[in-house]
Amino acid sequence: MDAERVLVTGAAGRVAGQLLPGLEGRPLRLFDRTAAEHPGAETVTGELTDPAALERALDGVGAVVHLAGNPDPSASWAELRGPNVEGFAALLAAAERTGVRRVVFASSVHAMGAHEADGRVPVDAAWPPRPCCPYGATKAFDEAVASVATRRGALSTVGLRLGATVPEPAQRSQLASWLGPADLRQVVVRALEADARDVRLGAYPAVSANTRQHWDLTAARAELGYAPVLDSEEFAARVADDGTDTGVCPA
Ligand SMILES: NC(=O)c1ccc[n+]([C@@H]2O[C@H](COP(=O)([O-])OP(=O)(O)OC[C@H]3O[C@@H](n4cnc5c(N)ncnc54)[C@H](O)[C@@H]3O)[C@@H](O)[C@H]2O)c1
């Protein structure tokens, strides 16, 4: 049987660049507003809010890894609303129409950032979302709108609250929330493959097995089968000291 085709949105971005080597062996289609490339992958260039472009991107697709969006935690509502709110709602509606089985989407630890900023760590994934900035609020909205879509139909969604998704942490404040490339690839594959009956929370922290952990991975381990292998402590002696261990939204 052929593996199902996976659409990766935001495929020209930084997270996708670290992820795509981990999706080898699956038929891939890439979507972005700027040209994206990966060996063997089909590409569709367009805007999330363009229904015709989304239809082309989703035609024949079984699962989506949704990364397109504005990743700037200091962005304003005006800058976030199109890509992070309207764009995601449009993608979900199109995925429901075209019969997609699973949408894995990039949420962010910022959706829970006020828990961390207030010192309630490690943050339990089952606590109510408590964003610390407009960016985090758009991610909390995305989690809510995904749960609505999941509830009313056949579509299954998994939100991944990505931490600092960089090849190596550069500052002390990233050590508690770092997500290294091998763990990024693993958690996305686990989220694509998890049985819908096991996905009880719908949104999970996605960080490495950091010694200075601020995010409780119990549910991600149990429900997705995520077993991170990296630890930011390996870099702790050489990161810049930016004066805080609270990486998401410093108080
Ligand atoms: N980088 C991180 O550390 C981090 C942490 C937490 C969450 N995230 C989330 O992960 C996702 C990817 O982040 P990134 O760092 O790769 O960002 P990025 O800016 O490098 O990539 C995002 C991509 O999405 C595309 N895009 C944006 N809006 C679009 C639209 N309306 N239509 C089509 N394409 C559009 C951009 O062209 C870009 O290539 C984002 O949703 C971000 O919020 C990232």
Image (cartoon, rainbow, N blue to C red):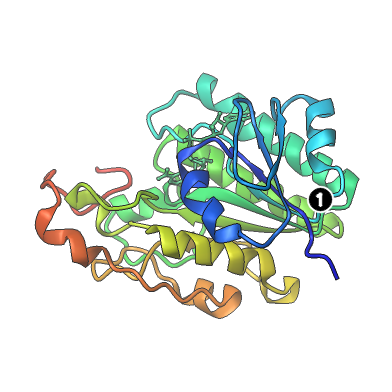
Residue in view at x 79 percent, y 60 percent: 4
Q: Is residue 192 left or right of residue 1?
A: left
Q: Residues within 10 Å of mark 1 (few under 14, many from 20)?
A: many
Residue at 73% x, 26% y is 49
Check the image and name the residue furthest to the front. 39
Amino acid at pointer 1: Val
In the displayed structure, 47 sits above or below 223; it is above
Q: Position of residue 218 (x, y in %)?
A: 46, 76
Is residue 115 among the parts visible in the rendering?
Answer: yes
- Residue at far bottom of view: 222
Q: Quadrant of residue 242?
A: top left
Residue indicated by mark 1: 61
Vertical placement of residue 212 versus 241, above or below: below
Position of the C terminus by quadrant: top left
How many numbered marks, from 0 up?
A: 1
Residue 85 vertical position relative to residue 162 in the rendered view, above or below: above
Image x and y of residue 67, in percent? 58, 43
Return the residue nearer the eye: 190 or 214: 190
Residue in the picture at 85% in, 48% down? 96
In percent of width and height, residue 152 lies at 85, 55
Viewer can see residue 206: no
Side (left or right) of 166 relative to 100: left
Q: Position of residue 226 (x, y in %)?
A: 51, 73
**Which residue is located at x 74 percent, y 39 percent?**
91
Relative to 102, say whether 95 is above or below.
above
Disc 1 secondary structure class: loop
Which part of the image, by quadrant, shows the N terminus? bottom right
Does the Cβ of the disc 1 residue fall within 8 Å of ligand 1?
A: no
